[in-house]
Image: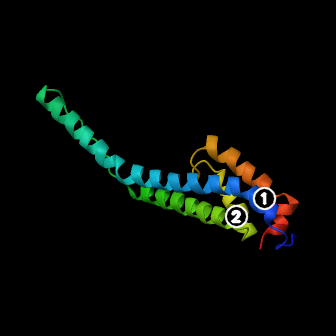
């Protein structure tokens, strides 16, 4: 088991970049999730309504399309927001060299494509954070 609370000067520098990257991208992802969930259906609904009006004017058959969310969509959004919230909080703790287990959890969650911004972003940054966290001087600097 690692001991926490050592010299944090060099460790702070090492964790700052991956933690800040995780923090900023996770917050951006949360905003995008919320916008896509609440705004996109309205915009899509308006577009579909205009398309249906155009089809009706041209005498074409109008197909009814439902863009509303079901209960499953809300559950999925809550899971994504909860996971992203853990990433945000864990990356803030990582920057402050506090709660090593939470920093590790955030790094691991960040690699899950459903919870992080994208596997192309999440996996490399999550690995970077894990490698940084597992350095002896970084581990020993956590309080």
Residue shown at the point (70%, 64%) measured from the top left: 94
Q: Is residue 66 visible?
A: no
Mark 2 = which residue? 94
Q: Position of residue 96 (x, y in %)?
A: 69, 68
Q: Position of residue 15 (x, y in %)?
A: 74, 58
State the colouring used for the structure image. Answer: rainbow
Mark identifier at residue 133: 1
Residue shown at the point (61%, 60%) measured from the top left: 87
Q: Quadrant of residue 45?
A: top left
Relative height, residue 54 to residue 143 (above, below)? above
Q: Nearer the viewer, residue 25 or 57?
A: 25
CB atoms of marks 2 and 1 within 8 Å: yes
Relative height, residue 60 to residue 138 (above, below)? above
Mark 2 element type: helix
Q: Position of residue 69 (x, y in %)?
A: 36, 53
Relative height, residue 46 to residue 74 (above, below)? above
């Amino acid at each position: 088991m690692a001991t926490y609370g050592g010299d944090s000067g060099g460790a702070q520098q090492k964790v700052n970049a991956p933690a800040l990257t995780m923090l900023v991208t996770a917050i951006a992802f949360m905003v995008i999730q919320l916008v896509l969930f609440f705004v996109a259906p309205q915009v899509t609904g308006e577009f579909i309504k205009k398309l249906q009006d155009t089809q009706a004017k041209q005498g074409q058959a109008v197909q009814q399309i439902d863009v509303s969310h079901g209960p499953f969509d809300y559950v999925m959004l809550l899971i994504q927001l909860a996971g992203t919230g853990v990433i945000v909080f864990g990356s803030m703790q990582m920057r402050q060299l506090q709660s090593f287990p939470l920093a590790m959890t955030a790094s691991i969650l960040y690699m899950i494509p459903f919870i992080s911004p994208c596997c192309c972003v999440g996996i490399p940054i999550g690995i970077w954070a894990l490698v940084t966290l597992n350095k002896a001087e970084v581990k020993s600097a956590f309080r």
